[in-house]
Amino acid sequence: MASRLAAFRQGLKEVGLVEGDNVTIIYRWADDRVDRLPDMASELARQATVIVTTGGPPAALAAKAATTIIPIVFLVGEDPTRLGLVTSLSRPGGNLTGINMLANELEAKRLQLLHQLVPQAQRIAVLVNPGINAETTLRDVEPAARTIGLQLQVITVKTPREIEEGFAWSERERPDALFVGATAFLNIRRVQLVRLAAFHRLPAAYGQREAAEAGGLMTYGPSIIEGYRQWGIYAGRVLKGARPGDLPVEQSTKFELVINNTTARMFGLTVPPSLLAIADEVIE
């Protein structure tokens, strides 16, 4: 999180705002407790000039429910019009705008990359959060799986214990690989997921590069650092007087494929030259 916040502050700096100098940031963390978000949003609505939200749709939706007046700048991983945050990407209207990281829109492509890396895999376990993440992930992944000829086994989890139980289930059902949905909760649990994938011998694809850095086989998704920098720029523009409703929702344009070659060798996999050629980073 430190590197992400540094990127956010860098974005603020690019529009002339420096924390502790001419801007004050009040931090609130839900610690993965979605039920805490409404109270936290209401508290900030009484104190803040601008509210910024990350951690996925629940935080942005809680902020929207808390105020129709205070500007809100969100960072989400999927289409904010589908979430009901804005009425239009080009003209958001109301008091919200922000950054769409396009994380969920990249899920089908990530499944294709996993298939290239593990071509012998025919049955793929898909790990998702119930609710919004599950719906958006499966909406894009299921058609892609049919096109490739893959069978999907969906596992829904919302707690660390359920992750453990999901892997115990996979040990009985024996899928050939694992596809981890792009969501804040699952990224937070990346060390647990990487450890369990290694223990159960499941080659896995993740949505954010931190998982590959933690030992995961492969990640493909938007550059989180660049997204946080964009988010900081937008927050700064709103603080300087721009109307959120007039600022088009920005969409990520930088995406990263990271392959952990050490983990690939552990699984007995040879990374094909076609993937090595397009990888942004290969971890040795």
Image (cartoon, rainbow, N blue to C red):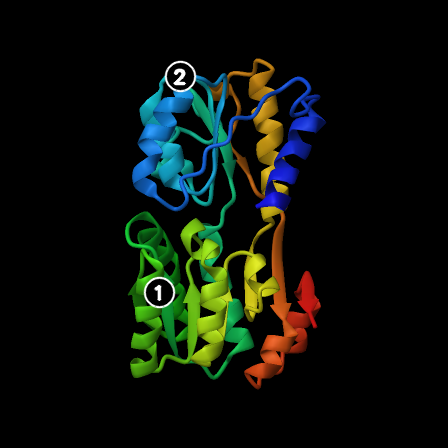
Which residue is depicted at the point 32% across and 63% down?
Answer: 161
Picture coordinates of residue 107, whole percent (x, y):
45, 58
Which residue is depicted at the point 39% across and 57% down?
Answer: 140
Picture coordinates of residue 87, whole percent (x, y):
38, 28
**For the residue marked with disc 2, what is the amino acid?**
Arg
Q: Where is residue 250, by image quadrant?
A: top right
The image shows residue 60, relative to residue 256, as above or below, that is above
Residue that protrudes farthest toward the bottom in the picture: 268
Q: For numbered disc 2, what is the local secondary structure?
A: loop
Picture coordinates of residue 21, whole percent (x, y):
69, 19
**For the residue marked with disc 1, what is the amino acid?**
Ile
Query: Can residue 142 be seen at all in this image of the molecule?
Result: no
* Between 207 and 201, the one nearer to me in the picture: 201
* Between 199 and 256, the one nearer to me in the picture: 199
Q: CA distance from mark 2 to mark 1?
A: 37 Å
Q: Which residue is denoted by mark 2 in the rendering?
A: 46
Q: Which residue is denoted by mark 1 in the rendering?
A: 163
Q: Give the position of the C terminus as an image quadrant.
A: bottom right
